[in-house]
Image (cartoon, helix red, strand yellow):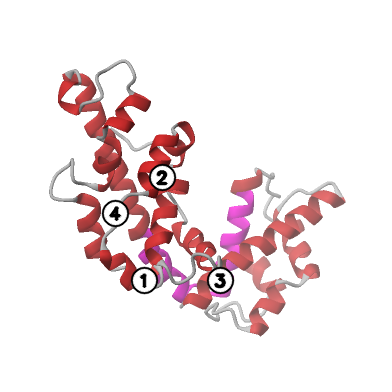
Amino acid sequence: MARKETFNNLIDICIQMEENPDLAGNAKEMFRQLLAEYFFRSDVYDSKKIAYLIENMALPDFLGECRSLIEIDMDRLRAFIEGDSINDSLGGRIMITADYLKSFYPHHPPAFNKLPPDVREELLRKVKNRNLLIIDAFEKIMTDRAADRSRKVITLVALILKNIHRKTGLPLNPPGAPAETVIRGIFAHCDDVFNAKQRQVAELNDDTKIKEIIKAFFTVKKFQDLAGITKLFKVELDRYRKRALRG
């Protein structure tokens, strides 16, 4: 069965948590917050019992050995998430519990072995899927970091424009020239790797150049729309700036 839910850009969430003085340097509590506010957010929203369960869940000591989830030992994390059995897995420790069954399977006895076979099968599938999604999200951090270290300025600008199009649905202008030519005509040092140097950030944050690149790629009819998209460009740039600084 295809997975319907994904947890993309976990690296950005982790960086945001590191900026929180109450969480900075405490990877174990960062992970707990991820469970409650990210991986099991909808479950916590629907049931205070699940929020309490996660709040009091024992987490492995190795999480306390690192200051950042971005640098987590992936082998140890994967072993913890998968567990020795489905019941002992991370998803199982939350979803195969009496509290979870009472909350989300209220018409059945709150004991896994007493559930009808088809319901047990459905629940096991959900547990496995949730475990895989969490593992995938952390593995993507590694992929993202590798991409961040080698991303050129021209690729960064193109990526930001792509993200703007995806988030806003703005219509694209008919191409008057190849995209690469347009970007190179506006921004200098396009072949440099983006490492968030002051010179790079200053140029990419230049309002005049941002508006020029936006008008080159998108159909923008109102001034307030242009101002809003300019702000979005800067938000996206800052996201990648923070990633680049992590190295």
Instruction: Work out how far the residue at label 1 is from the one at label 2, CA to CA, in angstroms.
Output: 21 Å
Q: Along the polypeptide, which appears first: circle 3 or circle 2?
A: 2
Q: Is the C-beta separation of discs 1 and 3 under 8 Å?
A: no
Residue matched to label 4: 58
* Residue 148 forms part of the magenta stretch: yes
Is label 4 in contact with label 3 (beta carbons under 8 Å)? no
Report, in whole angstroms, how far the alpha carbon at label 1 lies from the one at label 3: 15 Å
Q: Is residue 93 magenta?
A: no
Q: Position of residue 60 (x, y in %)?
A: 26, 60
Mark pair 4, 1: CA separation: 21 Å
Earlier-in-chain disc, 1 versus 3: 1
Query: Is tag 2's residue or tag 4's residue first in the polypeptide sequence?
Result: 2
Are circles 2 and 4 on residues that touch, CB within 8 Å? no
Q: Pointer 2: what residue? A: 6
Rendered residue at 34%/19% (across/down): 106
Is the magenta region chiefly helix, strand or loop? helix
Q: At 45% from the left edge and 52% from the top edge, which residue is drawn?
A: 8
